Amino acid sequence: MTAATAAPMRDAPPSAAQRVLAPVVLGVVVIGVWQLLAGSGLVEAYLLPSPAAIGEQIVEFAPTMLSAAGITGLNALLGLVLGSLLGVLAALAASSARPVDGMLAPVVAALAVIPIVALAPVLNTMFGADSQVGRQLIAGLAAFVPVFITTARGLRQTQPVHRDLMRTYAASRWQIMRTITLRTAAPYTFTGIRLASSLAVISALVAEYFGGPRGGLGGLISTSAASSAYPRAWAYVVAAIVLGLAFYLVTLALETAVSRRR
């Protein structure tokens, strides 16, 4: 075998089975080491519960976890949809008028650095202890920033020659926007939504630590840790991880489906 034929083999991308197997093997190794470390007595159980103890809590409190994941997931979903819509609309406005872009840039920069731990108590108090609106708004703010940034970048990728060609065909401004600008920006928008999906879940979870109804995963993690039920708290953390992965995978599937239709 010559060097010329060996190089493409070395550079060949991993297969689908390899991409799935690698993280699975890594996860099994991490859980095995975790179990050995937790059972060795070197680490106190309240600091690091064993995977076996966490698994028992997952089985015992599965119905509660499903109900809590539904509450947190709904807050994250509403925030993701609201933030994504506002992000796309704001990016369209910024790309169509330079003064609007200049006004929105510092606002988006300010929103990007707002700490959730400072904003959550304010919004929860503003909308009342029985309302989920504050958490949904926090998730929406978290989703708005990446969607706006990626969409604004995508809208600027349209080549001027393409717009000029459409004008020679007497295309209206809306037709140019629909057939060229939006289609060019779509992959960037879906990348932003994919990034925002995880941020929306994280923001909804963090917001549940600071007042409001106690039925979500974030509130149950806080309550379990405060009552020294550490395996149960870790079990709720696992449920939160699964929820975040579910959001990410769904948005990734939507992005893939749209990319194939383009």
Image: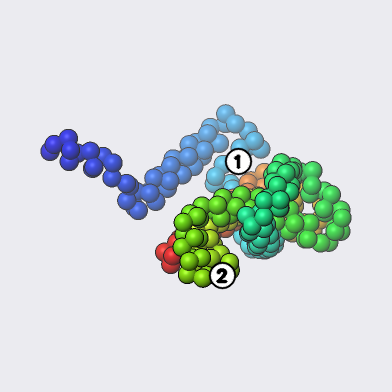
Q: Which residue is mark 2?
A: 172
Q: Is residue 26 left or right of residue 40?
A: left
Under tag 1, what secondary structure?
loop
x, y percentage for residue 135?
A: 75, 56
197 and 98: which one is in front? 98
Against 166, is 147 above or below? above
Q: How many neighbours does mark 1 have within 10 angstroms: few (below 14), some (14-19), or many (20 or more)?
A: many
Query: Would you name the residue on which mark 1 appears?
Result: 49
Disc 2 to disc 1, C-alpha distance? 63 Å
In this rendered view, identify the residue nearer to me: 164 or 154: 164
Whole-percent x, y for residue 81 in the image: 65, 62
**N-term mark: 2 or 1:** 1
Give the residue type at disc 1.
Pro
What colouring method underlies this structural image? rainbow
Query: x, y percentage for residue 125?
Result: 86, 53
Quadrant of the rendered image containing residue 247: bottom right
Check the picture and name the quadrant holding the C terminus: bottom left
Residue at horizontal 39%, vertical 45%?
22
Q: Amino acid at mark 2?
A: Ser
Secondary element at image label 2: loop
Residue 232 in sight here = no
**What's the residue at 50%, 60% (across, down)?**
163
Q: Name the one closer to the observer, 204 or 52.
A: 204
Identified at 71% across, 53% down, the residue is 100
Quarter of the rendering occupied by the N terminus: top left
Res. 46 image quadrant: top right
Q: For the point 70% across and 43% down, which residue is it?
A: 109
Residue depth check, mark 2 versus mark 1: number of the one nearer the observer: 2
